[in-house]
Image (cartoon, grey):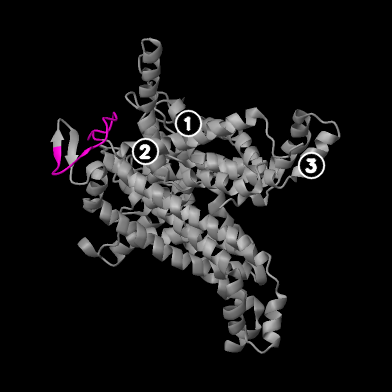
């Protein structure tokens, strides 16, 4: 008997589920090349290259040819701002949460201290409560705190404390840290501590041992944690939605705002670019992980 | 101080954990406690919070009203109770559908030759990491009256010569259900795969050699061994479905209000943070109760870590 043989029922349902997963993505891509501005029906590709020409809502000619909406996207100032905000938030929150999350993982895996159980439980909470509960909590905290501080320090006008990039960044750190700690701990779990003892026996102090022996060994875990934190931050909608303020929209927030108004194929172009980036990123991560496995 | 740092292990541990703990206390524990405190308060006319201790927000959430149209002092208004039960049943239906769809797929990947597994998994990860909002948008395009599905159906009907009236699919319960399943299906597939992959392929042969039919093998061996995956997948799907508001917002229109929409609305539109906080506390309690009983019955396992 061939152990890889599966019943036709399994094969067919697998194919159907893959179809279910990919049909929406294919449609998103296709409509990014739509000549129709309203983007309700697919009116065909933009075939002619030349100065933009629009006839009754249909783009028939564009300097970028079929890639008209991608060019429009690149020119869109709001998209540029949202991209800059998204990347700023993701970079700062990833850097911070990776460092402090790695420390936390080491502490929880190696040390006994008073607040240990409390720390473990609090790190599990963000994983088992709906994101909106955490988002609302942070919103309540900041709005009460800012109201208090603004009146206590009698701040007025532009100097008032409001929601914005900073509040989003600290919130992103808070929800990524548990995931970083989890991933790094998993790596530390299989760590052979005798190599550290060997380093110390050979005269290295704790810091040198950590820097030259421990850190390089757990580095793959730290990198996976950082990558996860980065993706979680890029992707986050709910917590950003409740902690952001004027001028601090991220890409998901911007897209959500558009979806409630008029949608041009620019949104599809944005989605297509995003999916391509994810495609490459997931591909590279998998390659990296499978190389580590050997 | 330095000497203490070098020798006291407990002190070192505390130092290492403290930045994380600072974030967890400041942006998780304190916010949750504050939400709880505010949920007992009441709303001032200008939308700010009057602190107090009263259960009126919770009473209102479960349907008891003190201002009634008929002039009675107390009456039953099920509007919020309906939102709660609708959210619960949607989360339940999504989870069941996700299990039914994820199981064959996870099983297929787990029994595929080792080299091909990574490719099949890769194909799961791409939609999973595609932005949440973008995925909802894709379904808006598919489901609307002039959308892709109706277009395809109309074309098919035209081929066989049927008259076709476009289906009203967007802004229905079904649309929200499909959207939720689409959003969270990968979170069911991955833990299921992790548990199915642990089953050694030779066991299937052994089971067949001992005379068990494929169905019996599935029932007596595969299914019980994959239970940790089912449990983890259920938790990973059920909890976020309970709290998500964009899917119902964009695919359900104004008609399908879930507890997430209620909370969002109370904070951003109705401007009653105290009632919104009460709803948030109830949401958290419901998910914690479900998770607690579910994991107590079936156990909590490492499959929960899919990422």
First of labels 1, 3 by sequence position: 1
- Residue where numbered disc 3 is placed: B203
Instruction: For marks 1 and 3, give the one nearer the viewer.
Output: 3
Please tell me if label 1 and label 3 are on a single chain: yes
Which chain does tag 2 point to? A
- Residue where numbered disc 2 is placed: A28
* Residue B98 magenta: no
Which chain does tag 3 point to? B
- For the residues bearing labels 1 and 3, Cβ distance under 8 angstroms: no
Q: Quadrant of the N terminus of chain B?
A: bottom right
Specify the segment rendered in magenta: A35-53
* Residue A41 magenta: yes
Q: Nearer the viewer, residue B172 or B1?
A: B172
Q: Position of residue B201 (x, y in %)?
A: 74, 43
Q: Position of residue A263 (x, y in %)?
A: 27, 37
Q: Is residue A99 above or below residue B69?
A: below
Instruction: For marks 2 and 1, give the one nearer the viewer.
Output: 2
Task: Please name the residue shown 77% across and 37% down the image.
Answer: B221
Question: How many numbered marks appear?
Answer: 3
Taking the image as shown, residue B42 lies to the left or right of residue A105, namely left
Residue B178: assigned label: 1
Which chain does tag 1 point to? B
Judged from the image, the secondary structure of the residue bearing numbered disc 3 is helix
Task: Please name the residue shown 32% across and 58% down the image.
Answer: A85
- Label 1 crowd (10 A; few <14 / some 14-19 / many >=20): some
- For the residues bearing labels 3 and 2, Cβ distance under 8 angstroms: no
Judged from the image, the secondary structure of the residue bearing numbered disc 2 is helix
């Amino acid at each position: 008997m061939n152990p890889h043989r599966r019943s036709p029922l399994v094969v067919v349902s697998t194919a159907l589920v893959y179809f279910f997963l990919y049909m929406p993505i294919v449609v998103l891509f296709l409509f990014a090349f739509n000549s129709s501005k309203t983007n309700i029906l697919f009116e065909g590709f933009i075939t002619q290259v030349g100065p933009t020409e629009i006839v009754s809502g249909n783009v028939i000619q564009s300097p970028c040819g079929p890639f008209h909406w991608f060019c429009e996207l690149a020119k869109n100032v709001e998209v540029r701002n949202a991209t800059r905000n998204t990347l700023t938030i993701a970079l700062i929150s990833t850097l911070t949460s990776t460092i402090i999350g790695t420390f936390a993982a080491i502490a929880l895996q190696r040390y006994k201290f008073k607040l240990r159980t409390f720390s473990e439980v609090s790190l599990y909470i963000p994983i088992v409560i709906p994101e909106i509960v955490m988002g609302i909590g942070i919103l309540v905290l900041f709005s009460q705190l800012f109201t208090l501080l603004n009146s206590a320090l009698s701040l007025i006008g532009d100097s008032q404390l409001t929601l914005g990039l900073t509040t989003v960044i600290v919130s992103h750190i808070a929800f990524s840290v548990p995931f970083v700690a989890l991933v790094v701990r998993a790596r530390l779990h299989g760590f052979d501590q005798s190599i550290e003892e060997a380093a110390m026996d050979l005269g290295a102090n704790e810091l040198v041992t950590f820097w030259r022996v421990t850190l390089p060994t757990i580095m793959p875990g730290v990198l996976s944690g950082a990558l996860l934190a980065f993706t979680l931050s890029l992707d986050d909608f709910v917590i950003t939605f409740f902690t952001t303020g004027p001028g601090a929209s991220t890409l998901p927030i911007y897209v959500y705002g558009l979806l409630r108004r008029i949608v041009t194929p620019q949104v599809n172009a944005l989605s297509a670019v995003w999916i391509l980036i994810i495609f490459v990123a997931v591909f590279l991560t998998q390659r990296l992980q499978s190389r580590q496995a050997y | 101080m330095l000497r203490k740092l070098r020798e006291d292990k407990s002190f070192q541990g505390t130092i290492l954990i403290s930045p994380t703990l600072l974030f967890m206390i400041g942006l998780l524990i304190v916010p949750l406690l504050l939400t709880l405190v505010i949920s007992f308060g009441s709303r001032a006319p200008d939308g700010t919070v009057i602190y107090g201790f009263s259960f009126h927000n919770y009473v209102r959430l479960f349907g008891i009203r003190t201002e009634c149209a008929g002039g009675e002092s107390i009456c039953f208004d099920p509007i919020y109770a309906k939102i709660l039960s609708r959210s619960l049943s949607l989360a339940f239906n999504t989870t069941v559908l996700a299990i039914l769809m994820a199981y064959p797929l996870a099983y297929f990947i787990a029994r595929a030759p080792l080299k091909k597994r990574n490719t099949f998994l890769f194909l799961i990860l791409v939609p999973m990491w595609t932005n949440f909002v973008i995925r909802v948008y894709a379904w808006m395009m598919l489901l609307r009256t002039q959308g892709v599905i109706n277009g395809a159906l109309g074309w098919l009907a035209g081929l066989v010569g049927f008259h076709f009236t476009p289906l009203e699919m967007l802004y229905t319960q079904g649309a929200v259900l499909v959207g939720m399943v689409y959003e969270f299906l990968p979170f069911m597939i991955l833990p299921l795969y992790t548990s199915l992959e642990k089953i050694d392929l030779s066991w299937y042969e052994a089971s067949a050699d001992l005379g068990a039919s494929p169905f019996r093998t599935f029932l007596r061996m595969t299914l019980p061994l994959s239970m940790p995956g089912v449990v983890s997948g259920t938790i990973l799907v059920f909890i976020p479905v309970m709290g998500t508001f964009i899917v119902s917002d964009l695919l359900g229109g104004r008609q399908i209000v879930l507890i997430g929409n209620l909370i969002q609305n109370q904070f951003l539109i109705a401007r009653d943070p105290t009632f919104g906080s009460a709803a948030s506390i109830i949401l958290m309690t419901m998910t914690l109760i479900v998770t607690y009983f579910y994991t107590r019955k079936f156990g909590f396992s490492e499959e929960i870590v899919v990422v």
